Amino acid sequence: MDAIKRYFRSPAAVTGLVLLLIVVAMAISAGWLYPREPLALAGRPLIWPFSNPRFPLGTDNSGRDIAAQIFHGARISLLIGGVATAIAIAIGVLIGAFAGFYGGWIDNMLMRITEAFQTLPNFVLLLVLVAVFGSTLTTVTIAVGVVSWPAPARLTRAEFLSLRNREFVQAGRTLGMRDLQLILGEILPNALPPVIVYASVVMAVAILLESALAFLRLSDPNVASWGNLIGLGRDVLRVQWYVSAIPGIAILVTVLAVSLVGQGLNDALNPRLKGR
Amino acid sequence: MRETSAAILTLDGLGVRLPAGADRPQALSAVSLSMAANEILCVVGESGSGKSIMANAIMRLLPDGVSIDAGRVMFEGRDLAKAGADEMRRVRGAGIAMIFQEPMTALNPLRTIGDQIGEMFSIHTGLSRAAIRARVLALLEDVRIPDPGAAARAYPHELSGGQRQRAMIAMALALDPRVLIADEPTTALDVTTQAQILTLIRDLQKRKKTAVLFITHDFGVVAEIADRVAVMQQGSIVEHGEAAAVLNHPQHPYTRQLVAAVPPLTTPPPRELSDDIILTIDNVSKTFRSGGFLGRGARVTPAVKNVSLKLPRGATLGIVGESGSGKSTLARCIVRLIDPDNGSIMLESKDWTKMTREDVRRETRHIQMVFQDPFSSLNPRRKAAELVAQGPIVHGTPPAKAIADAKELFALVGLDPSASDRFPHEFSGGQRQRIGLARALALHPEVLVADEAVSALDVSVQAQVLQLLAGLRQRLGLSIVFITHDLRVAAQICDLVAVMKDGEVVEHGPAGDVFGHPQHSYTKALLGSIPGGEFARKREAALLV
């Protein structure tokens, strides 16, 4: 309760939340504002924004409605951001928790694997995964999640390392709790706040990764995503720059919103760190 | 009589304001004190009484949001409460120096001791390097560090706690300050080291005629070192006078309560002990190994060496020793938080050292543990009732019943059952320790292992918790293994006492014998180092008449 109050005291955090809610509202309203297939041809290609009331944001090089693609694209970005983050955090927390709790050779083994993933630039790894498994929406989402878990794993491990020797965990052991009860019931709730905060970073990066993939035309071409639109606009970047710029602004706003919310959560969940 | 000159440091109606939302509006209100050269003024009070804030207010080192709002701090004719930042910088270190409780955090870990002491000279004086070096060595000799040359080249982590505190004192006295503020300088130290440091401070003070403002919570330390005493409660000075007068004839009820709470050194009359031995520790050893590759260069620390002890049913066995003596490792071996290397621990004809982890988990309700730190021993995200109910729930009691039982236990340990849905941070240290006790009792154990269970508490709270423990022992027929570094506490509650040093039990027997007629030289040294021992003995004699 205190955390919620503290959250709403920060103007930046509230701004972030409002922006994020706008993006969510776009995603929800896309269905009835633009009921037609967003990738269907709608009019003349390359109409500038604000010149034709039917296409408030203009059309792209194949004559598809940019506004419709932006609204439907919000769905895809939030979907990829949300699901990929969930995958990354789930894998990361699992590996980090076991490594941190048990230590010893389990920790050594799991951390060497984590390092192996971390030494590869995650975008390169993402390209490999997409090249091997194809670029449907599902594989792209899973691939983004799979390349993003090492950082949350390290964070969770660090938290577990410091918490597992606390007396309340030893007390739980003397009460006869099983390891899993200690991990899930005692340590995890105390380790989670920084991980939740980090999830916002993972989400922002996930959205950017998908866009970067789409820019290289390696994302799923059959869905209206912001990245795909930027990729299309690449061909007409010097004259009809708006085709790339409009989805670019959408991505910027979303990533900014997620980051602000994350920072706000951080200050709200760890109030003592603020002002340091 | 010592010569008393005019006051050098005078606090005149000093008030310090706390930020809104603190537990009280004023950290200090109308505090007036004065100190003359060549005397030790002890400020005594329990945690939260404002004694450390007072020291920080004099040095003008108050945390953000806390500020002086009334009164004056007169030092050498200047009012420090209004002094500018530059002026304060010249006063700190050179005019008024300070030593702290934990020398490890007060020293910079990346620089040698000699460097850090030398810095005092390079900041405040224009001495040459060679001169500084000579002064540093002289100072280290003054505080009687063994091998001053090596100590000057050492990093803080290479010295023992006592040596670090000596280095801190050397640094504080480097510029011959007229006032030395010592904020609980011996609290983190072992009792024998504490006695040495107290003697050192006393000697240096006499020789250099420094005025010492000594802050402590321990009336034993006061009896040992003070010329005058000021007693603080809730930010005000409630009593103030010559040490002998305050200690022997306390006027204010709070002072009386604090003096009375100082644990006596003599043991209560021995109780009848049962012949039925409930816990037998036989030849238990534990060695920690760390580092090294394929067995080479590994550090081997024998923490517990061939310890054999017996605990009769219903009795309390005290295990006393200084830090590093292996007493906590032994406690953790008994409850199998640590697996001992060899030996056996027989609890009611079952050998705990031979049981598998799963067996221990199932049998754990027979033996429970109370932990030291009232802040880290409770999961901050669980309500008090849940914490107490956890154990029974793990062992299959339905949650609703376990919670109801927990509320009954709250009454048993002297907590308000209606407070059971609060979180740990809403309780005081003593109350948290009671929750920890209730959690251990929830499984109806036969043996309770208390690891420094009262060490983190104020004396008056300590006395209450000990009373509670003694009462519960009687009512529930508990057998207790009581681990402590404080011999005074052990004397109060234990029937049997074992003294540990470097992992070995050097002496054990009935408490009256060990405390009354110690055989081993180490036990004698421990007993001789208890601060205020003389005072405690005199007071007991007075009480007996």
Image: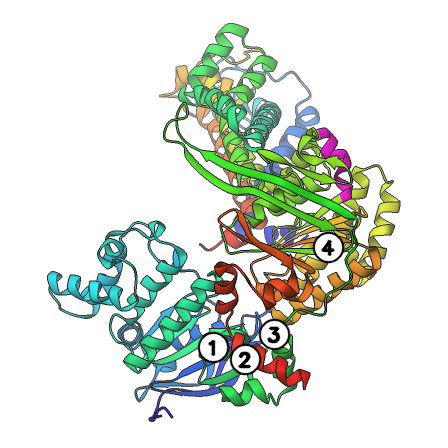
Residue B67 visible to the viewer: no
Query: Which residue is denoted by mark 2 in the rendering?
Result: B535
Query: Which residue is denoted by mark 3 in the rendering?
Result: B262
In contact (CB < 8 Å): disc 1 and disc 2: yes
Quarter of the image with the C terminus of chain B in it: bottom right
Quarter of the image with the N terminus of chain B in it: bottom left
The circle drawn on residue B437 is 4
Q: Label 3 vs label 2: CA separation? A: 10 Å
Mark 2 belongs to chain: B
Q: Label 4 vs label 3: CA separation? A: 23 Å
Q: Label 1 vs label 2: CA separation? A: 8 Å
Q: Nearer the viewer, mark 4 or mark 1?
A: 1
- Name the amino acid type tagged 4: Leu
Q: Are marks 4 and 1 on the same chain?
A: yes
- Name the amino acid type tagged 1: Glu
The kind of secondary structure the magenta stretch mainly shows is helix
In contact (CB < 8 Å): disc 4 and disc 1: no
Name the quadrant containing residue B236. bottom right
Q: Label 4 vs label 2: CA separation? A: 32 Å
Question: Few, some or many C-alpha atoms within 10 Å of disc 4 (few <14, some 14-19, many ≥20)?
Answer: many
- Measured as percent of width and height from the top left, residue A92 is found at 56, 27
Question: Few, some or many C-alpha atoms within 10 Å of disc 3 (few <14, some 14-19, many ≥20)?
Answer: some
Residue shown at 48% from the left, 28% from the top: A246
- Which tag, 3 or 1, sits closer to the chain's start? 1
Give the magenta-colored segment's residue range: B358-366
Mark 3 belongs to chain: B
Query: Which residue is denoted by mark 1 in the rendering?
Result: B224
